[in-house]
Image: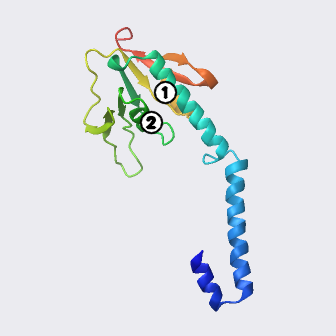
Amino acid sequence: MSEFKGMSRFGNTATSLAVSATLGIVVAVNVGAFLLTDLSYSAKSIREHDRNLLIMLAGIKKTFRTDDTIVLDARSSLFYSFRHVQYYLRDYKVYLGDLRTNKRGETWHIFGGFDGRTFLSDAIRIPANSRYLVYLMDPSDEEYKRDLQSHNLRRLSLENGIVLFYRDIKKDV
């Protein structure tokens, strides 16, 4: 703002008012978008995301043991990411295994996480003592939901319509 004050010393009052009015309009539009819309960066969407993420993480923690469960983020999502599991559920092994090819023909690496540390991997390692493979999913990604359903995975229904898809490795082989 000090830059604008410095400019106004050399300008006229009309310019100063125009700049102030423009800034006021920009701020008002941003505040309105944040408070009154359903955009992904709105207050309502952030509250819904946080509630859904809490439900998912609590569902994983309550249902699946840390020593025999791997959480897989097979479709990278900014809002429901393997990083959330890595941060909030540090004792779980989690992988980002999104191997889709982008428009430039590039494929991501596989990233793993355990105990707050990240590592690169050439494959998803499933230890012999593993029993569950839990798929992390953005609840709004209907395409991915249909894809998971087509693989006849087990479903764990949680609050607010949240569903966790998982495979019981020992029984579903």
Residue at the extreme bottom: 10
When the figure is inspected, residue 155 is found, relative to residue 57, above or below; the finding is: above
Q: For residue 89, which quarter of the picture?
A: top left
Q: Mark 1 packing: few (<14 Cα in 10 Å), some, or many (20+)?
A: some
Q: Position of residue 68 (x, y in %)?
A: 33, 17
- Front position in the image: 53 or 155: 53
What is the secondary structure assignment of the residue under circle 1?
Answer: helix
- List the residue tagged with mark 2: 84
Which quadrant, please, contains the C terminus?
top left
Label 2, label 1: how many angstroms apart (C-alpha)? 9 Å
The tag earlier along the polypeptide, 2 or 1, is 1
Circles 2 and 1 in contact, beta carbons < 8 Å: yes
When the figure is inspected, residue 163 is found, relative to residue 45, above or below; the finding is: above
When the figure is inspected, residue 89 is found, relative to residue 66, above or below; the finding is: below
Residue 120 placement, left or right of 156: left
Specify the label residue 57 is tagged with.
Answer: 1
- Front position in the image: 65 or 104: 65
What is the secondary structure assignment of the residue under circle 2?
Answer: helix
When the figure is inspected, residue 160 is found, relative to residue 169, above or below; the finding is: below
* Residue for point 36% across, 20% down: 66
* Residue for point 34% across, 43% down: 108
- Front position in the image: 20 or 95: 20
Q: For residue 1, which quarter of the picture?
A: bottom right
The answer to whether any part of residue 30 appears in the image is yes
Count the labels in the image.
2
Q: Position of residue 149 (x, y in %)?
A: 51, 21
Q: Position of residue 39 (x, y in %)?
A: 65, 47
The answer to whether any part of residue 150 appears in the image is no
Amino acid type at circle 2 is His
Amino acid type at circle 1 is Leu
